[in-house]
């Protein structure tokens, strides 16, 4: 059984989850599908438009069932675990799948190189542009969005970080550099950060729960989730409170 270090798995892109019960650390691999050659095109609704595996057409139904699989590393045994792999192994094969994953780990850990899904990005994405939105269900993967540092626009949330980076790169090609939300919010508190989603993400990373944040600001938890997803913006007074937590 092949063992890996935490840094090796983080190098191929993953989200860390800590099990409070036994102290286990898990790293869920974000884009395992891209690492093995599975390419998915989606409609604006998020549904699969077309799919291919290493250039070969795959039906949308099969691709959707393949994506059910989850790949993660555990600190308990330092190995990778694959869940719900039935359809995945039927299409790609067990040996081919693990050969592709091991090749990606070896390549990324030694000398990380841009991959095919990064080709749309012509410049490095700012670290603070991509927002991680924690799931409300324990053990479920977070979703991702972006907030443009030039104009303040927040994109829709997607399942993979790389898709958020792609969306951000596409936005930059047409970004005029003006704050599209500035006209909707009073500018009486310039000391408060303008991005509630980033504030909420920072608070969650510091250990605050959504319920605690909502209680401190005086709103319902659903409102905090909407702020985190960029669906709504808080008023200036509530934004000031949020920034002061």
Image (cartoon, rainbow, N blue to C red):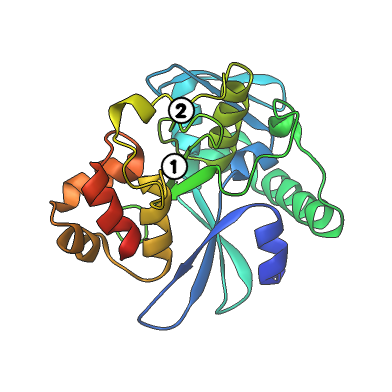
Is residue 185 visible in the rendered image? The answer is yes
Q: Is residue 81 above or below residue 18?
A: above
Nearer the observer, 205 or 162 = 205
Q: Residue at x 69, y 52 (%)?
A: 12
Image quarter of residue 171: top right
- Give the SS element for disc 2: loop
How far across and down, in percent of the image, does residue 178 sit?
Answer: 51, 24
Q: CA distance from mark 2 to mark 1?
A: 38 Å
Nearer the observer, 116 or 92 = 116
Image position of 2 (left or right of 135): right
Q: Residue at x 53, y 34 (%)?
A: 148
Residue situated furthest front in the rendering: 188
Which image quadrant: the C terminus?
Answer: bottom left
Q: Residue at x 13, y 51 (%)?
A: 220
Is residue 136 visible in the rendered image? The answer is no
Image position of 59 (left or right of 105): left
How far across and down, in percent of the image, does residue 7 sit?
Answer: 70, 67
Q: Residue at x 44, y 42 (%)?
A: 68
Image position of 128 (left or right of 236): right
How far across and down, in percent of the image, does residue 73 sit?
Answer: 58, 65
Sequence-first tag of 2 and 1: 1
Which image quadrant: the N terminus?
Answer: bottom right
Nearer the observer, 154 or 30 = 154
- Give the SS element for disc 1: loop
Residue situated furthest bottom in the rendering: 22
Q: In the rendered image, which residue does mark 1 sit on? A: 68
Label number found at residue 179 = 2
């Amino acid at each position: 059984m092949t063992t890996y270090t935490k840094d090796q798995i983080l190098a191929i892109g993953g989200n860390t989850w800590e099990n409070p019960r036994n102290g286990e650390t898990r790293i869920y691999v974000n884009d395992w599908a891209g690492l093995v050659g599975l390419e998915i095109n989606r409609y604006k609704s998020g549904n699969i438009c077309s799919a291919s595996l290493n250039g070969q057409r795959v039906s949308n139904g099969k691709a959707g069932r393949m994506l059910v699989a989850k790949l993660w590393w555990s600190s308990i045994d330092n190995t990778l675990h694959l869940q719900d792999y039935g359809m995945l192994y039927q299409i790609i094969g067990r040996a081919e799948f693990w050969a592709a994953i091991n090749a990606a780990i070896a390549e990324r850990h030694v000398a990380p190189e841009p991959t095919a899904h990064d080709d749309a990005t012509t410049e490095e994405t700012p670290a603070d542009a991509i927002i991680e939105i924690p799931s409300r269900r324990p053990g479920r993967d977070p979703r991702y969005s972006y907030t443009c540092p030039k104009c303040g626009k927040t994109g829709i949330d997607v399942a993979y970080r790389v898709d958020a980076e792609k969306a951000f790169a596409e936005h930059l090609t047409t970004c005029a550099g003006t704050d599209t939300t500035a006209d909707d919010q009073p500018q009486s508190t310039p000391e408060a950060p303008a991005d509630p989603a980033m504030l909420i993400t920072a608070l969650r990373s510091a250990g605050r729960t959504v319920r605690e944040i909502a209680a401190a600001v005086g709103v319902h938890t659903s409102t905090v989730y909407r702020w985190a997803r960029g669906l709504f913006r808080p008023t200036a007074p509530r934004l000031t409170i949020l920034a002061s937590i």
